[in-house]
Image: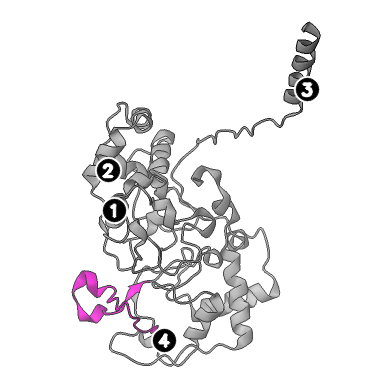
Amino acid sequence: MNYFKIIVIFLVIINYSCSVDPEIKPEIKIDNIKEIIPEGWPTPNYNFSNNQLTNDGFVLGKNLFYEPMFSIDNSVSCGSCHQQFAAFAHAGHDLSHGVFGLLGKRNAPALQNLNWNPTYMHDGGILNLEVQPLGPIANPVELNEDINHIISKLNATTKYKELCKKAYGDETLNSQRILKSMAQFMGTMYSYSSKYDSYKKGDVSFTAEEQRGYNLFVSKCSSCHTEPLFSNFNYINNGIGVTLLKDSGRTHITGNLADLYKFKTPSLRNIEKTAPYMHDGRFSTLAQCLNHYSSAIPSTATVDPSLIGGIALTAQDKTDIIAFLKTLTDPTFLTDKRFSE
C-alpha cells in the first residue's frame, strides 16, 4: 500500500513538473503621462490647465474608454469602434454597429492629436473634448445610454470605486470626473513619430517616390490637408455625392443650406491604417480616393470650387502620393501599450 502511494505521488510530481506554466502578463506601467506640443506645431485648442493631467486620471479614462457599461445593453464601448491598430478608427467598417446590432450613419473617425481639433464629429457638432463622449452616449444607434444611468452602474462596482479614489481622492464618480478623465486619455493620443516627422527633423530621407509624392501633395492637396496636422479642420463638400443615407452634413448643425453636404476635413496622419474612407466609408483604398479627386467632379451649389472638374493627376502621380501618405504612419502610436485595451 505504501509502495503504491509512493508511485502515485511520484507520478503527480512528474506530471506537475512537466506542465506548462500559465502565462503571466506583466502589468502595463502607466507613467510619465504629460502634455506634449511637438516642435513646430500650433498651440492646441484644448489643454489641461483646467483638467490636471495625472497617471491615475489617465488610467481611469482608459478604463472608461473601453467600458461596455457605457451602452444601454452593456455590449459596446468607445473602444469597440475606435481600435488602436487602426489609429482608433474602425478597421474594415464603412459604418459601425452600435447597440442591438444597429447600424450607424457615419464612418468612425480616427482619434489622434485631438487637442488641436476646434470641433469634433464629422459635422462639428461638439465644441469641446470634455463633452465629446456625450454625443455617442446619447445616440440611439450607438450607445443609446443616459449619463446618469452610466454613473449608477459604474458606482456600483468595486473596480471604479478604487480607480476613482486613486484619481480623485474619493470613491464617487460623477459626470465631471468621467468626462475629464476620458479627456485625459483621449487628449494624450499624440501621433508625431512617423517617417514624415523624422524627415522634417532631418533625421531620414524620403525615397525618390516619396519625395515626388510629397511635392505633389504640397502643390495639390495641402490647402485642405495642411501640415503638420494634415487638416485645416474646415468643412467642405468634396463632391462625393449623396448616398441613400441622405446625410446633410454640417447643415445638420447650422441649419444653413450653404453648409449642405459639407463635412470636416479629416487629418491624414496614419491614413494608411484608417480605411475605409470618407464620412460614409464608401472608399476602401487610397487609390479610390485619388481616383475620385481626379475625376470630373460636377459643379453643385456647395461643392468646393477648387475641386470642380477634378484635380489633374496621372497614374504615376497617384502612386507617388500614396507612397508619401504612407510616410504618415506612426508605428509608435499604433502600438503604444499605454493605450491598449
What scheme was used to colour the molecule?
one colour
Closer to the camera: disc 4 or disc 2? 2
Question: Which element type, helix, strand or loop, lies under badge 3?
Answer: helix
Label 3 crowd bin: few (<14), some (14–19), many (20+), radius 10 Å: few
Vertical placement of 42 versus 159: above or below? below
Vertical placement of 323 versus 125: above or below? below
Q: Earlier in the sequence, mark 4 or mark 2?
A: 2
- The location of residue 76, given as percent across then percent down, is 38, 52
Q: Amino acid at mark 1?
A: Ile
Q: In the image, is residue 195 part of the stretch drawn in magenta?
A: no
Residue at image location 59% in from the left, 75% down from the top: 322
Q: Earlier in the sequence, mark 3 or mark 1?
A: 3
Return the residue at label 1.
137
Residue at image location 40% in from the left, 83% down from the top: 240
Say whether marks 4 and 2 touch (CB < 8 Å).
Answer: no
Disc 4/disc 2 C-alpha distance (Å): 45 Å
Disc 4/disc 1 C-alpha distance (Å): 36 Å
